[in-house]
Amino acid sequence: MAVLDQLEPKKMFHFFEEICQIPHGTFDIGRISDFLTDFAKKRNLEVIQDKTGNVVIKKPGTAGYENSAPVILQGHMDMVCDKRPESVHDFKKDPLKLRIVDGSVMATDTTLGADNGIAVAIGMALLDSDDIPHPPLEVLFTADEEIGMGGATAIDMSLFKGRMLINLDSEDEGIFTAGCAGGINFYNQIPVKKQQADGTAVTIRVHDLLGGHSGIEIDQQRGNANKMMGRLLNRIERDVDFVIAEINGGSKANVIAFDCTARLIVQPEDAAKVKDFAEDMKETWAAEFMGDEPTMKVDAAVEDHVSAMSFDKDSTGRVISYLIVSPDGVIEYNRKIKGSVETSLNIGILETAEDYVRASYQIRSSLESKKVQIREQLEQCAKVVNGESVITGEYPAWQYNPESNLRTIMVETFQDMYAKEPEFVTIHAGLECGLFMGKCPELDCVSIGCDLKNVHSFNESVDIASAARTWDFVKEVLARLK
């Protein structure tokens, strides 16, 4: 039985629920891409599906709008796949379990994918309609935005006649985005040598932090479990002789790490000390966060008489040193826009492999030179511990355009509908508009969206009333673009 079938607008929420039944994590968008292609064919709409999985669906203008300038509507197909540690949900095959909580739609123990499933649902509902006035529509659903923006990188902009583009990937109703940071997907590998170690195992876990989006929520100074673990291990190392058997934390490079686990091999008489240090550090963090990490937990479990392959002493020290000196979080604020983050990075993943520990980052900045500065800083951090650095993807910033006809029309529409002015921002997150404008500089872009909370985390939600208002707003904007 459908969970959202009583929500308005029915068509938009119907399509959103359909999307939620199809696995569509980043790099696993084949099924949703095919679904959208079939959707278009069943309605006799022109559709293009490229090798990357991008889908472009075109629909002629309605009566009176046949000769109007085409409008591009755009959102991405993929979602961040994150879940509670105890969840057994399989993002490769299981549908999301939707629920309605206090006026919002959420998934059960997983991300919801309203980022950017709501955009896809709006596009589908418009394409499916026969009673909504609009100019010719060119609806672009991009692939693999969340990690590397592969779809936007690959899209051929010559497919489009439109020069006005409404991106539907923002997360706050009434806030129009007119610029965004560029970014680098980056990782460092710290080499480790392993040997057999005997003793007592102490497994330390820093977990149940709030986490969140590494761009939008980086200014909230939420705890990063990977950095916190490095601090704790550094404290323990001052008084206890130990080696690391393994260390793993975080889930995505663009998600603030909310969980990190390290397994240490210590002498039996030191196990109690390690537990005490963990408890002391938990109290220190509680005082430092001042209530901003209300669910934070720090656990230490002891296992006697263990023999395990572990890092040697030198490797253990280098990994800890790396975690201490590697930067993380907000680096600089914008000098012209008060309170706006200019440059940041997030150590989103730590993972132990056979002969290295990998630290994966999302670097963000609205200035190209600052992106380079942080990349070079991380490269030097790697050199200090004999590691190596790899860039896995990069995307440009979207520079604010003071002259935008599309933005003028959207502002007038918003004022007429809600008797107030929208807010304009440039955001500290990557939007695909930067890549589109790099290929087609004459594009006039604005990004909007409805109220989403805790995106990229298992607490993600979309406000039902806000989504409905955003739907109404998009319809009215299209009606005025005659």
Image (cartoon, helix red, strand yellow):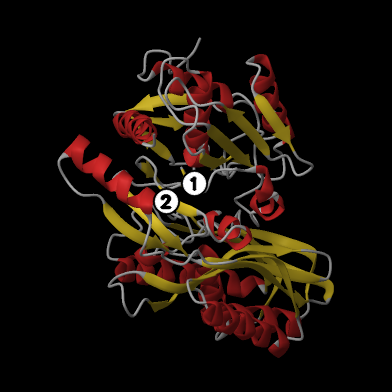
Mark drawn on residue 107:
none
Judging by the rendered image, the residue that carries numbered circle 1 is 165
Query: Which mark, residue 446?
Result: 2
Q: Residue 427 location, x and y as percent? A: 41, 61
Vertical placement of residue 358 versus 93, above or below: below
Does residue 250 appear in this view?
yes
Q: Residue at x 19, y 38 (%)?
A: 416
The picture places residue 114, in percent across and down from the top left corner, at: 48, 37
Residue situated in front as seen by the camera: 387 or 145? 145
Question: Are the residues flagged by discs 1 and 2 in contact, CB closer than 8 Å?
Answer: yes
Horizontal arrangement in the rendering, residue 273 relative to residue 342 (left or right): right
Q: Name the one closer to the observer, 380 or 363.
A: 363
Residue 1 placement, left or right of 381: left
- The one nearer the camera, 384 or 412, is 412
Whether residue 362 is visible, yes or no, is: no
The quadrant in which residue 334 appears is bottom left
Q: Which one is earlier in the sequence, the residue at label 1 or at label 2? A: 1
The local secondary structure at tag 1 comes to strand
* Label total for image: 2
